[in-house]
Amino acid sequence: MKNKNRILIVGGSGFVGTQLAKALVRNHEVSCTYRNEFTALPGIDYIPFHGIHEKDRCTSLIQKVKPEVVIFAAGSNDPERAEKEVNQSQTVHLTGANQMLTAAEYAKAKYIYLSSDWVFSGMDGNFGEADTAIPFHGLGKTKLGAENYIRSRSLNHVIIRCAPLLGRGTLDHPSWVDQLREAGVFERPRVLSDRSIHNPVHVRELALLIERVIENDIRNKTLHLGGLTRISEYQLALKIFKTFGYDVKHLSPAKTGPQNAIQDYSLNSTQTLKLLKTEPLLLQQSLDLLK
């Protein structure tokens, strides 16, 4: 029988946090923080939490839960939102992540930080863990800042850089897929990027990776998680619309930046696949899981 760990998911009411909680509660004791609203799942303890950037609040939270594992899943992975809400993005992704790490260190808890493929330049694509991260976007800069702080201060951490995660959210916190499907149902026009390339992966693969990290006591590593298909947001939306039978005429590409300047942020997940000891999902398999 697997040993149960006390796991605290910071940002546990959001799309990613909820999906992780749903998977991890099968074998572990899970607590989730929330700010305003959450969709309750059975067997999970929900804790209201504000002031993520305040050291005393973070310390108090850790002392209350006494976790053996802390997963930092707070904040939004939307680069446009990060550019519009610079202070909020830095407060959560950088200051909040750092303060929570400091508190987690007192409890000697493993710290798992969810980073992003936006930490890379987008110049080449197929980025491996050893490639130099040079972010051009504000979101990537704050994420990389937190990564560097964690590496310099923690002796028991894992940083997971994620490609865009596919999955279904909740009524309180819908995912990007949920919002796209709503546009399809109500025939609302959507303009999506056709210049940024990523390799999206289903959120269940992230949950599986975190399970392996905890079970095998993996520490002090940076891991990449991405799918097999490199695709733009617009092309992905077309595939999702076709999967659910929506009219693709309501989708249009937004070609931003210089003509033909396509940026590729795709991640090479070879190390992660070896760790998971599993075959990666094809994009269509991930889309089928959305039904």
Image (cartoon, rainbow, N blue to C red):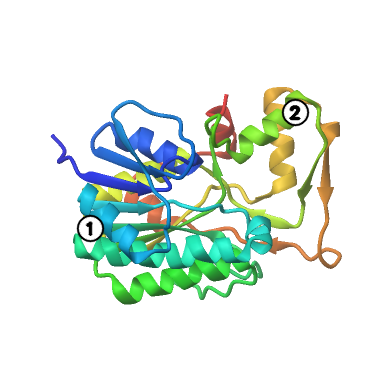
Viewport quadrant of the N terminus? top left
Indicate the quadrant where residue 165 lies: top right
Q: Which label sits on residue 266?
A: none
Please tell me which residue is depicted at 59% across the width and 51% down the height of the picture. 199
Nearer to the camera, 251 or 48: 48
Nearer to the camera, 29 or 59: 59
Where in the figure is residue 258, as x and y percent of width and height?
84, 68
Q: Which residue is mark 2?
A: 184
Q: Which label sits on residue 109?
A: 1
Please tell me which residue is depicted at 36% across the width and 37% down the height of the picture. 21
Q: Amino acid at mark 1?
A: Ala
Where in the figure is residue 254, as x and y percent of width and height?
82, 52
Q: Mark 1 against mark 2, which lies toward the viewer?
A: 1
Mark 2: few/some/many CA within 10 Å (<14, 14-19, 20+) = many
Q: Is there CB contact under 8 Å for labels 1 and 2?
A: no
Indicate the quadrant where residue 22 lies: top left
Q: Amino acid at mark 2?
A: Gly
Please tell me which residue is depicted at 64% across the width and 61% down the height of the picture. 85
Mark 1: few/some/many CA within 10 Å (<14, 14-19, 20+) = many
Question: Position of 231 compared to 273: left or right?
Answer: right
Secondary structure under badge 2? helix
Question: Position of 262 compared to 33: left or right?
Answer: right
As drawn, 242 above or below 192: above
Viewport quadrant of the C terminus? top right
Nearer to the camera, 92 or 7: 92
1 or 2: tag closer to the N-terminus: 1
Secondary structure under badge 1? loop
Label tally = 2
- Answer yes or no: is residue 187 visible: yes
Where in the figure is residue 144, as x and y percent of width and height?
49, 70
